Image (cartoon, rainbow, N blue to C red):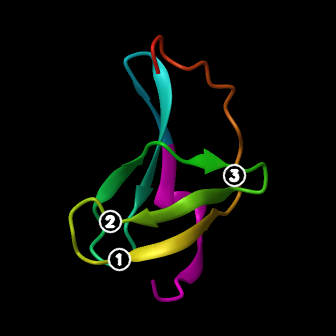
Amino acid sequence: MPDLDCILLNADKWKWVLRDGYPLLKVQCPRCDCWGDVIDHTIADSGTIDPSVMCGEGCGWHAMVMLKQFHRIIRQEPPNA
């Protein structure tokens, strides 16, 4: 696998939304501007997302991501997660 770019996403390129009553992180692809869900990832207190993030629309964007001005929401996992 080639080395991935590491990018810092400004606060207007990510957001928390509620899905089925639970917070879900969404990020905007810097290449095609679509919004995608961040599922099955961990987010460090620094805002670093692990593993890497890919565009959900298939434009080919793939990078290691850190969220600028990240603030954690206490998240309760849905049952049977």
Residue at 23% from the left image edge and 75% from the top image edge? 59
The residue mark sitting in front, 3 or 2, is: 2
Q: CA distance from mark 3 to mark 2?
A: 20 Å
Identify the image quadrant of residue 62: bottom left
Q: Residues within 10 Å of mark 2 (few under 14, many from 20)?
A: many
Q: What secondary structure is marked by label 3?
A: loop
Which residue is tagged 1?
A: 61
Measuring from the top left, give residue 61's x and y in whole percent. Answer: 35, 77
Which residue is tagged 2?
A: 55
Give the residue type at disc 1: Trp
Residue at 47% from the left image edge and 89% from the top image edge? 2
Q: Residues within 10 Å of mark 3 (few under 14, many from 20)?
A: some
Give the residue type at disc 3: Phe
The segment highlighted magenta reads 1-15
Measuring from the top left, give residue 36's x and y in whole percent. Answer: 34, 53
Q: Which residue, as the protein is rendered here, is positioned at the far right? A: 45
Q: Is residue 8 left or right of residue 35?
A: right
Q: What secondary structure is marked by label 2?
A: loop
Q: Earlier in the sequence, mark 1 or mark 3?
A: 1
Q: CA distance from mark 1 to mark 3?
A: 21 Å
Residue at 37% from the left image edge and 17% from the top image edge? 20
In contact (CB < 8 Å): disc 1 and disc 2? yes
User: In the image, is residue 5 part of the stretch drawn in magenta?
Assistant: yes
Measuring from the top left, give residue 52's x and y in whole percent. Answer: 51, 65
In contact (CB < 8 Å): disc 3 and disc 2? no
Q: Which residue, as the protein is rendered here, is positioned at the far bottom? A: 2
Q: What secondary structure is marked by label 1?
A: loop
Identify the image quadrant of residue 48: bottom right
Which residue is tagged 3?
A: 70
Q: Is residue 56 left or right of residue 38?
A: left
Q: CA distance from mark 1 to mark 2?
A: 5 Å
The residue mark sitting in front, 1 or 3, is: 1
